[in-house]
Image (cartoon, rainbow, N blue to C red):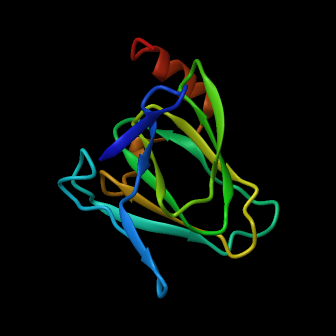
Amino acid sequence: MTSPSPLGVRGCQWIDVPGASDARGSVNFLEFGQALDFQPRRIFWLHHVAPGQWRGRHGHRMSKLVLVALNGHCLLHLDDGTVRQQVRLDDPAKALYMGPWVWHELTDFAPQTAVMVIASSFYEEVEYLRDYETFRREVGGQGR
C-alpha cells in the first residue's frame, strides 16, 4: 500500500494504485499480500446502474472493502456513526479502502460507470447491516 491518505471517516483511506502509462494506454494493479491488509475472498463489480439509482446503503460488521472506479464516476457517501463524508470515485489509479463498521452508499452514477469492489469475506447476509438505526446502535456498541 503506497501513500495511504486518511479520510475523516474512521477506517477509510485512499490508496494510490500503482501502475504505468505509455502511448498504448495505462495499466494499474493491486498485488494481493502486499497492497491490501487482507486476503480477498470476493470480487464483484457494479455497472449499468440506472439513472437516479443507488447501490450499497448498508454497513458491514466484519468485511473490509476496496472500491475502484474502473470507468466513469459516482459519489460514495461514508458514515462511521459519528462522521459523514462524501467522496467522488473517479480515478482507476485511486482506490478507497473501507474497514468494517462504515455505512456506505453509492449514488450519482455517470453513464458507463463501472466500480470494482474487492471484499475480505464471502457473501453472508447476516454480516450486513441494512437498517441505518440498527447500524447506529451496533456501531455505538463498538466504542465509537
* Placement of 94 over or under 4, stated as above or below: below
- Residue 18 image position (x, y, % from top left): 36, 60
For residue 95, side relative to residue 107 (left or right):
left
* Placement of 46 over or under 86, stated as above or below: below
In which quarter of the view is residue 30 placed? bottom left
Q: Nearer the viewer, residue 9 or 25?
A: 25
- Residue 1 image position (x, y, % from top left): 29, 47
- Residue 14 image position (x, y, % from top left): 46, 43
Residue 27 appearing in the image: no
In which quarter of the view is residue 19 placed? bottom left
Q: Nearer the viewer, residue 88 or 100?
A: 88
Q: Which of 135 and 110 is in front in this view?
A: 110
For residue 38, side relative to residue 29 (left or right):
left
Task: Give the farthest residue toward the left.
Answer: 33
Residue occupying the point 48% across, 54% down: 94
For residue 103, side relative to residue 14 (left or right):
right
Task: Give the farthest residue toward the front.
Answer: 23
Residue occupying the point 47% across, 22% down: 138
Task: Give the farthest residue toward the bottom.
Answer: 24
Residue 117 appearing in the image: yes
Task: Give the farthest residue toward the right.
Answer: 52
Placement of the C terminus among the 4 image quadrants: top left
Q: Which of 41 and 86 is in front in this view?
A: 86
Residue occupying the point 55% across, 25% down: 8
Q: Count numbered badges in the picture.
A: 0
* Placement of 71 over or under 79, stated as above or below: below
Residue occupying the point 50% across, 68% down: 45
